[in-house]
Each structure stands twice: as structure tokens, then as C-alpha cells.
Amino acid sequence: MRGCIVFLGPSCDLETAREILPGAEFRPPAARGDIARAAEGGARVIVLIDGVFLQDCAVGHREVLGVLRAGTTVIGASSMGALRAAELDGLGMVGIGEVYRRFRDGELESDDEVALVYDPESGCALSEPLVNIRATLEEAVAAGVISPDGAGAVLEAARGLYFPERTWASVLRRADLPDGVREVLVRRPPVDLKRADAIAALEYARGL
């Protein structure tokens, strides 16, 4: 898709993203100024999925609003994109996905929910975002694998860790759970809301 720039990092692998949106230009997670520069360079559609948190200044609200006023379509999902879309959807930014919905509806509030660390060379996540831990626990409760109280204990253990230290192994070590429940959770594939939302945003952009 020509004229489309996607800011993407650990939320979805590049191979999958390029299959969904061939012809788009893929750039690393966005920092302050990157959205404006993309629009100035001629992008008519910008998909903001991943953005920096601590390494550099984050994408600013005024920056996105300026791009929207200039007529560029800005889609947000999954991570930094979901945060900004939840704040700016009433002003023209398009929000996609479950993470965006939860922030929009006030179910989630902290940027810490989507924060993680990743390998800049491979793009692979090295920690687990809290929003994915929540979704995995919700699915486990629904399946009868863990009680709501047990899920609450795991979630509190995750929240007690600084986000770069949140891995399933570290979270489950801290949680007060029966060994059998811990072993079942280790074996269950985690829910990846951020990846699902990134794919949904790319598919939405493909339809424009």
C-alpha cells in the first residue's frame, strides 16, 4: 500500500505485517517527531502501533493533532498507538482493537499496561506486557484453569514487578499458587492481545 507508513516493533513480526500490507513502509517504534516527519514526507496513512517509552521522548498529542489537521489518516492500535487513539479518537484519530477499547473505556489507565523491553536487533519481546498477562488470566479463569482469586494473585505479582522484569516465569515465581495450577499456566499458550490488535490495524489500513 503506497503512501502508508507503519511504526512497528515487537507487537508483530515484520514478515506477517508485510504480508498483510504489502507496499507499505515499515519504520521502527515511533519517537517524538517521527509522526510529523512521516506526514511531511508525503504519507497519507500512518499506522502507529509501537512507540518508545523510556529510550526517547514519546509521540506527543500535539504532533498527532497537527498531522490530523493536515489531512493525514492516523490509525492507532496495540501499544503506543492504542494509548494515543484512546485520547484522540474524538479528534479524528482512528483506534483499532481490544487494547484501544480498554483504554478508551477506562478499564485501563496506565502506560505501564503496554510497556515492555525488546531486542532492538531482532525486534523480539524480552518481557511480557501487563495487558497480555491480564488477557491470559481472563482466558484461564473462563476455562476453569484458575480461580478469580488465583488470577488476582498472579496479576498483583505482575504489577509488583518493574516492566522490564515481567516474564511469565518471574511472575509465576512471585505468585502464591498451588504447584499444579502454576504448572498448567506455564503450559498454556499466552494470549497476545497486542499482536492481534496490530494485525487488525494493518488489515483496516489495507481496506482504505
Image: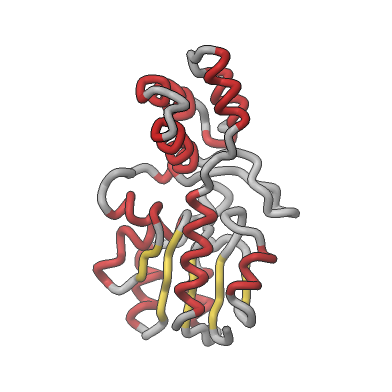
Residue 73 drawn at (x, y percent): 40, 79
Quadrant of the snapshot with the N terminus: bottom right
- The correct choice, above or below, for 49 with respect to 112 in the image is below
Residue 148 drawn at (x, y percent): 36, 25
The residue drawn where x is 33% and y is 55% is 101
The residue drawn where x is 61% and y is 53% is 10
Number of numbered discs visible in the structure rendering? 0
The colour style of the image is secondary structure
**Residue 208 picture quarter:** bottom left
Residue 8 drawn at (x, y percent): 58, 63
For the residue pair 90 and 193, the one nearer the viewer reads as 193
Residue 20 drawn at (x, y percent): 59, 73
For the residue pair 75 and 193, the one nearer the viewer reads as 193
The residue drawn where x is 51% and y is 79% is 206
- The correct choice, above or below, for 86 with respect to 19 in the image is above
Q: Residue extending furthest right?
A: 121
- The correct choice, above or below, for 18 with respect to 101 in the image is below
For the residue pair 6 and 61, the one nearer the viewer reads as 6
Image check: 128 left or right of 124? left
For the residue pair 191 and 103, the one nearer the viewer reads as 191
